[in-house]
Image (cartoon, rainbow, N blue to C red):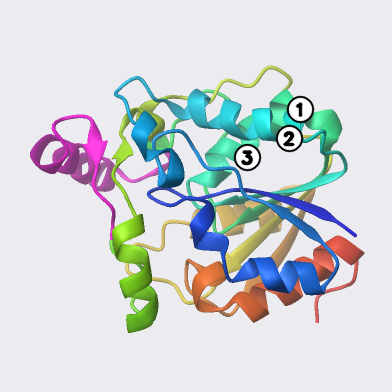
């Protein structure tokens, strides 16, 4: 049995991994998806002072309080920023670090640092025009998201504090020394924001690189395919 902990994406929360829960249970694994402060069921805690560090501490706290060890830590999308910080804080509890179509920051980088200048300007403009200067409204899900899933997601996705995107990551212990896997979702949208990290994982030592025939939210649009990949990671099987 493996213990998976997910650092979820922006505008999202624990609810978004609902389809993965029965698949994980059937495979004999444990799935923990801590909800970030200000999002999902913790929306009532939304405040301008929430930063990337807040969300890192949310996940660190869940791991410590549940006394989780030998964790397969997954960072999805924005959650790659969070997972990198979590692995730095509690690296002794992390067996593997998995980036699922996610940002992979280096020390001192923010999420906005990892985007082209035009995308950064667009995010800042959205916060100024639609988020009272400190919130980023939810961005559209991938176009292959079903109508039923869109209806389910819409009332659960909330604006995200922009400081979570602006704040740089500060590492205390350097890069995670253990096994890192990058899963690149090949049904790419117009922005193609994560290809830069897939290229890095293919050429930089210390990485295992995998591809998934899915769009950016495979836990919603392709849960069975994602489960197959994660099962291989948990068991050490070669991807087929």
Where residue 189 sits in the image (x, y, percent)?
A: 37, 70
Residue 175 showing in the rendered view: no
Residue beneath the point at 79% across and 30% down: 91
Calculate the distance from the C-alpha at mark 1 to the C-alpha at mark 2.
8 Å
The stretch drawn in magenta includes residue 134: yes
Mark 2: few/some/many CA within 10 Å (<14, 14-19, 20+): many
In the image, residue 137 sits, relative to residue 171, either above or below, namely: below
Q: Residue furthest left?
A: 129
In the image, residue 10 sits, relative to residue 147, either above or below, namely: above
Q: Secondary structure at mark 3?
A: helix
Left or right, 28 with reference to 9: right
- Tell me whether circle 1 and circle 3 mark residues in contact (CB < 8 Å): no
Task: Name which of mark 1 and mark 3 comes first in the sequence.
Answer: 3
Task: Name which of mark 1 and mark 2 comes first in the sequence.
Answer: 2
Q: Which mark is residue 63?
A: 2
Q: Which residue is mark 3?
A: 83
Mark 1: few/some/many CA within 10 Å (<14, 14-19, 20+): some
Residue beneath the point at 82% across and 62% down: 29
The stretch drawn in magenta includes residue 163: no
Where residue 61 sits in the image (x, y, percent)?
A: 66, 28
Calculate the distance from the C-alpha at mark 1 to the C-alpha at mark 3.
10 Å
Q: Secondary structure at mark 2?
A: helix
- Tell me whether circle 1 and circle 2 mark residues in contact (CB < 8 Å): yes
Range shown magenta: 114-139
Q: Secondary structure at mark 1?
A: loop
Query: In front: mark 1 or mark 2?
Result: 2
Left or right, 142 with reference to 58: left
Q: Which mark is residue 90?
A: 1
Seen from the viewer's position, the closer of residues 204 and 89 is: 89
Where residue 192 sits in the image (x, y, percent)?
A: 41, 63
Residue beneath the point at 32% across and 69% down: 190
Mark 3: few/some/many CA within 10 Å (<14, 14-19, 20+): many
């Amino acid at each position: 049995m493996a213990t998976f902990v997910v650092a979820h994406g922006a505008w999202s929360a624990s609810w978004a991994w609902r389809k993965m829960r029965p698949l994980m249970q059937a495979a004999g694994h444990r799935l923990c998806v801590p909800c970030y402060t200000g999002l999902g069921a913790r929306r009532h805690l939304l405040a301008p002072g929430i930063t990337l560090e807040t969300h890192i501490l949310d996940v660190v706290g869940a791991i410590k309080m549940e006394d989780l060890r030998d964790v397969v830590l997954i960072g999805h999308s924005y959650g790659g920023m969070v997972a990198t910080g979590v692995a730095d804080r509690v690296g002794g509890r992390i067996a593997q670090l998995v980036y699922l179509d996610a940002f992979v920051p280096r020390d001192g980088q923010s999420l906005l640092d990892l985007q082209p200048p035009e995308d950064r300007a667009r995010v800042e403009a959205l916060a100024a025009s639609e988020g009272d200067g400190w919130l980023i409204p939810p961005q559209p899900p991938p176009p292959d998201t079903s109508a039923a899933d869109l209806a389910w997601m819409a009332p659960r996705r909330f604006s995200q504090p922009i400081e979570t995107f602006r704040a740089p990551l500060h590492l205390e212990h350097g890069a995670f020394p253990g096994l890192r896997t990058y899963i690149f979702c090949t049904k790419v949208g117009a922005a193609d924001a994560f290809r830069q990290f897939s290229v890095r994982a293919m050429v930089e030592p210390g990485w295992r690189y995998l591809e998934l025939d899915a769009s950016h939210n495979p836990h919603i649009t392709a849960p069975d395919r994602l489960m197959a990949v994660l099962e291989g990671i948990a068991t050490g099987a070669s991807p087929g």
